């Protein structure tokens, strides 16, 4: 890690940052001359900092604050090491960190450790998840009282229409996307295809599949940070909030995953389009945990504006082959790449918690040899199906009481997340829709 800074003498300051439960980057600015100390000894801040609400406030009744004296945790660099922050004017490096207790144990309230614990469960069985994510986001001009599509730097015009898979829409913001892909190269984020989506100024970028789920979550977290920061340098906003426009579809964060055995074979592949029993077990696990996991997939007030029928976001708890109306889809293609696509999460999620919930639920199903219902055909919105929770309150209650969630997440993380969301629910209820959009636009 130290060698990276020596190769980049232009970098004069670093940021050390960890993801809190809302995936907000919490950390410190440090002069480069003291970077070696951070690398060797880590840094410290209160355990409660990873359990702040969306405004950055303490949780009122959290036992992490006054009850325990607001004790410190020790934050150490992740294996990612230093990377540039291309959205800042001055040359600056980011060092991702995660939290441990004073005695060296992982802090179980850290979302990155929650995912690590799930990955360790897979490793104990000789299994390795392979993960890819698709991130949807909006480019937005929020300089006035009403959100709108930014003016194209190329044409000087504002296109007020959805342009699904439009090359013209991509080319209208070519300078932004060129800078974005160059920045992804600098940060070693594996950005692949970009397309325009169905919303106003909405785009999707796919990140390449990765056999390290922690790195895949890192990539998604860093990518969201990069997109939002770089957009501001271009004079507009980028947002991953679930649904900024009432009349258009919202943004999802779809996850594709398969699982390899110790020989590197895909355990979902049986040479046919149907896949193995293990694939169906994993699907069943995902469906069984769906209601309890919804708070992870839809963590904010605005999230539930997206989870409505006929809006390109799954609401029925079901699965199907090559069916995008289903919550869990089995894509077609080469059997060796047989995989599961989980389609419920919004763009506003914490990627660490999202992947922990999805992969943990799939492993629950594999361990239990669980059997799913029959796959659906046709339009899931038109079928009588069990539904994901439709309100934030219902999702909080389902998460807190779910036995599936209790197998995936540590009790401390469950408690902290529930306390956080109950506090946010209370205070968000006092705000106007415009005030909520203002809060979510840049944070999530």
Image (spheres, rainbow, N blue to C red):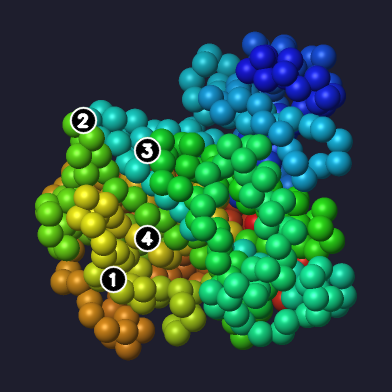
SS type, badge 3:
loop
Q: Residue at x 75, y 59 (%)?
A: 175
Question: Please, is residue 36 above or below residue 107 in the view?
Answer: above
Q: Earlier in the sequence, mark 2 or mark 1?
A: 2
SS type, badge 4:
strand
- Tell me if mark 1 has few (under 14), some (14-19) or many (20+) residues whose alpha carbon lies within 10 angstroms of its own: some
| Quadrant assignment for the C terminus | bottom right
SS type, badge 2:
loop
The answer to whether residue 182 is seen in the rendering is: yes
Q: Nearer the viewer, residue 144 or 262?
A: 262
Q: Earlier in the sequence, mark 3 or mark 4?
A: 3
Q: Earlier in the sequence, mark 2 or mark 4?
A: 2
Circle 4 is placed at which residue position? 342
Q: Nearer the viewer, mark 1 or mark 4?
A: 1
- Tell me residue 37's x, y (percent): 72, 12
**Residue 313 numbered tag:** none
The answer to whether residue 60 is seen in the rendering is: no
Task: Left or right? Give the position of 196 relative to 372.
Answer: right
- Tell me residue 32's x, y (percent): 80, 19
Question: Please, is residue 29 above or below residue 248 in the view?
Answer: above
Q: Quadrant of residue 182?
A: top right
Q: Quadrant of residue 121?
A: top left
Circle 3 is placed at which residue position? 211
Q: Earlier in the sequence, mark 3 or mark 2?
A: 3
- Tell me if mark 2 has few (under 14), some (14-19) or many (20+) residues whose alpha carbon lies within 10 angstroms of its own: few
Q: Residue at x 34, y 47 (%)?
A: 359
Question: Please, is residue 157 above or below residue 373 in the view?
Answer: below
- Tell me if mark 4 has few (under 14), some (14-19) or many (20+) residues whose alpha carbon lies within 10 angstroms of its own: many
Circle 2 is placed at which residue position? 262
Q: In 3D space, how far apart are the residues under numbered discs 1 and 3 (Cα atoms)?
A: 24 Å
Circle 1 is placed at which residue position? 322
């Amino acid at each position: 890690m130290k060698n990276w800074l020596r190769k980049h003498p232009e970098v004069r300051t670093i940021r050390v940052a960890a993801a809190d439960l809302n995936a907000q980057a919490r950390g410190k600015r440090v002069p480069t001359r003291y970077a070696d100390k951070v690398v060797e000894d880590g840094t410290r801040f209160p355990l409660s900092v990873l359990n702040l609400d969306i405004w950055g406030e303490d949780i009122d009744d959290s036992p992490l604050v006054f009850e325990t004296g607001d004790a410190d945790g020790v934050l150490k660099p992740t294996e990612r090491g230093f990377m540039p922050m291309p959205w800042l004017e001055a040359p600056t490096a980011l060092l991702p960190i995660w939290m441990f207790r004073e005695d060296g144990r992982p802090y179980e309230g850290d979302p990155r450790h929650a995912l690590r614990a799930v990955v360790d469960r897979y490793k104990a069985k000789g299994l390795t998840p392979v993960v890819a994510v698709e991130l949807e986001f909006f480019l937005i001009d929020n300089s006035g009282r009403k959100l709108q599509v930014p003016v194209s730097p190329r044409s000087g015009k504002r296109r007020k229409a959805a342009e699904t898979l439009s090359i013209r829409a991509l080319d209208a913001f070519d300078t932004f996307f060129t800078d974005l892909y160059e920045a992804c190269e600098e940060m070693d984020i594996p950005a692949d295809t970009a397309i325009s989506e169905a919303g106003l100024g909405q785009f999707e970028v796919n990140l390449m599949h990765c056999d390290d789920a922690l790195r895949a979550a890192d990539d998604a977290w860093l990518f969201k940070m990069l997109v939002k920061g770089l957009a501001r340098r271009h004079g507009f906003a980028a947002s991953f909030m679930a649904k900024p426009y009432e009349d258009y579809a919202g943004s999802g964060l779809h996850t594709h995953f398969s699982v390899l055995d110790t020989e590197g074979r895909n355990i979902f592949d049986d040479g046919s389009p149907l896949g193995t029993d293990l694939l169906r077990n994993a699907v069943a696990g995902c469906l069984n945990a769906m209601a309890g996991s919804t708070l992870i997939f839809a963590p904010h007030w605005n999230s539930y504006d997206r989870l409505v029928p006929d809006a390109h976001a799954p609401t029925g708890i079901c699965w199907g082959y090559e069916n995008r109306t289903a919550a869990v889809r089995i894509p077609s293609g080469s059997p060796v790449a047989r995989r599961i696509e989980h389609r419920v999460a919004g763009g506003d999620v914490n990627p660490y918690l999202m992947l922990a919930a999805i992969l943990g639920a799939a492993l629950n199903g594999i361990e239990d040899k669980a059997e799913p219902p029959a796959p659906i055909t046709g339009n899931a919105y038109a079928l009588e199906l069990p539904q994901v929770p439709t309100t934030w309150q219902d999702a909080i209650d389902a998460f807190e009481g779910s036995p599936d969630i209790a197998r995936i997440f540590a009790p401390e993380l469950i408690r902290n997340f529930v306390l956080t969301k109950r506090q946010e629910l209370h205070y968000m209820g006092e705000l106007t829709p415009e005030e909520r959009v203002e809060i979510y636009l840049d944070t999530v």
